[in-house]
Amino acid sequence: MTTRTTTPGANLRTPPSIIATIIAVSAVASAFICWLVYFHAPIDVAGTRLRSLPLVNAILNALSTVALVLGYRFIRSRKIDQHRAAMFTAFVFSSIFLVSYLTNFTLHGETHFNRLSPWWPFYWKLLASHILLSILALPMILITFFLSLTGRFPAHRRLARYTWPIWLYVSITGVIVYWMQSAIH
């Protein structure tokens, strides 16, 4: 008789209330960001304070991208501890990014792109996909982390197959959007 060793949470069913809570918190966060970006009057209209925040945001997105790619390579090599460290690093960079992003919008408001630029159609589509997928990514990232932290690895793996490429896309396009905004006013 062979016995299978499993982690404590591997076969547990995730309580729907946990998933609902994560989705609700994500929806409230997304609604707050929408309000902040499109309806909140900026505090520092002249842009005299913390003008480097957009660059900081791009760097944080780039660092998150690097950590995500390393995390993927580690899990493909079955280096679980390194994978976990890389994914936590990506999460930390993304979390700091979110705080910096919110601070930037609180201070300076929305950055406008030159609609007369020939790049406008590409920029608009890229920004729209970035925004929509970032709204989708937030609950997916939180649920994927929850599944991992509670030892529900089969469910974690299933969801991570979708979470990782969306998170990677959002991180990469965040850097591209910054570059386009700074290069083409």
Image (tube, rainbow, N blue to C red):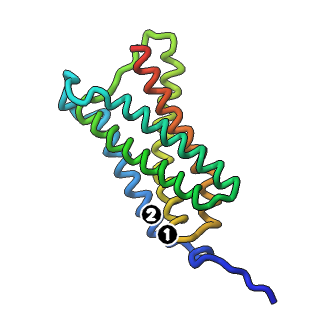
Q: Viewed as shown, does residue 52 lie left or right of 23?
A: left
Q: Position of residue 69 (x, y in %)?
A: 60, 44
The C terminus is located in which quarter?
A: top left
Check disc 1 and report its element: helix, strand or loop.
Answer: helix
The numbered mark at residue 16 is 1
Q: Position of residue 162 (x, y in %)?
A: 61, 50
Q: Amino acid at mark 2?
A: Ala
Outermost residue, right direction?
Answer: 1
Q: Viewed as shown, does residue 76 lie left or right of 169?
A: right
Q: Position of residue 183 (x, y in %)?
A: 43, 16
Q: CA distance from mark 2 to mark 1?
A: 6 Å
Mark 1 residue crowding within 10 angstroms, few (<14) / some (14–19) / many (20+): few
Residue drawn at x 48%, y 16% is: 120
Report which quarter residue 160 is drawn in: bottom right
Residue drawn at x 50%, y 27% is: 176
Report which quarter residue 33 is drawn in: top left
